[in-house]
Image (spheres, helix red, strand yellow):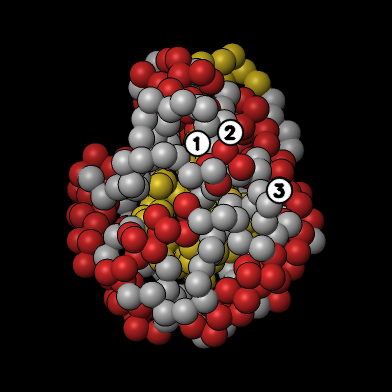
Amino acid sequence: MKIGAQIAVTSHTIDAVTLARELEERGFESYWAPEHTVVPKHPGIPFPMTGGEIPDVYHQMADPFVVLSMMAAVTTRLRVATGVCLVPEHPPLSLAKTASTLDAFSGGRFIFGLGTGWLTEVTALHNPAAAKKPWGYTIDSVKAMKELWANETASYQGELVSFPEMICDPRPAQRPHPPVIVGAQPTPVAMRRIAAWADGWLATGLTPDQVGAARKALDEECDRIGRDPAGISITVGVRDPSEEIRDAYENAGAERLMVLLYNHPGTRIPLEDWPAVGAATLAAPPPTPAETLRALDAVQQMAGL
């Protein structure tokens, strides 16, 4: 079982360079950077986890590609991932360039985790067309970027994304492209999308039983379209990576756990308490660097690294 980590790096938390070095030294396989560009001062959409105010950390998050570039520069084994990149907030040509550059210069260590996000009022500021059809825009963008990454030149004609023949260098070190991991709830539509064009699924807030049911649905959809289901990995965001938790998710079909580290208490957290603990950790003041390192030590022991 691979063990990754996610924590929002901000100007109030541990810095990206220190975090990267500490994660690699402790044996973590990957780091997943979340993304929110801006947050409205007076949002019209409540925070989904609580139905209330959006926690400050959501507008404090550093740009994920800047963070990942800094982390890749001071490590040699740590995989650097977006967890997740909000594709509808990016022009696909510039996003393709950024992602391929990071993969090329990190020696093929980038994982492209993606999603559409829930703050549609922010998406509309970036791209009104994408806000109306976020998944349509995302699918078009991914298909277009894959063409740019895989070929010396590429053009694309889609409903929401189109461009004439273009050159996009440097191309990714991973061929034909970095792994594309979709962050989404386990709906039938999401399972069909993942089976059709993704390399993996990122799930957060789901029990092992829910992950197992989704793995079965993914396998059935792969069988239906003639794809080998072994080509689709499952990553699960967790708050406790202890042995029995690892075993339960591995038996459900997951190959990686992404430990949610922001304000982690450094103790075992029963699965039934994860939603309440998650809301509390996000609402609390930012963790100090020392608090994060203490949590890393505890999580490292829990995860058997």
State the quadrant of the N terminus.
Answer: bottom left
Which one is in front, 57 or 156? 57
- Residue type (three-letter) at the residue carrying disc 3: Ser
From this view, report whether residue 142 is shown above or below residue 233: above
**In the rendered structure, which disc, 2 or 3, sits on the residue that comes first in sequence?**
3
Expressed as whole percent of the image width and height from the top left, the position of residue 208 reads 27, 68
Expressed as whole percent of the image width and height from the top left, the position of residue 197 reads 39, 41
The Cα atoms of the two marked residues, 2 and 3, are separated by: 14 Å
Residue 5's image quarter? bottom right
Tag 1 residue: 86
- Residue type (three-letter) at the residue carrying disc 2: Thr
From this view, report whether residue 100 is shown above or below residue 95: below
Give neighbour class at mark 1: few <14, some 14-19, many 20+ (Cα, 10 Å).
Answer: many
The Cα atoms of the two marked residues, 3 and 1, are separated by: 21 Å
> What is the number of callouts on the image?
3
- Whether residue 59 can be seen here: yes
Give the number of the mark in front: 3 or 1.
3
Tag 3 residue: 11
The Cα atoms of the two marked residues, 1 and 2, are separated by: 9 Å
**In the rendered structure, which disc, 3 or 1, sits on the residue that comes first in sequence?**
3
- Residue at image location 22% in from the left, 49% down from the top: 221
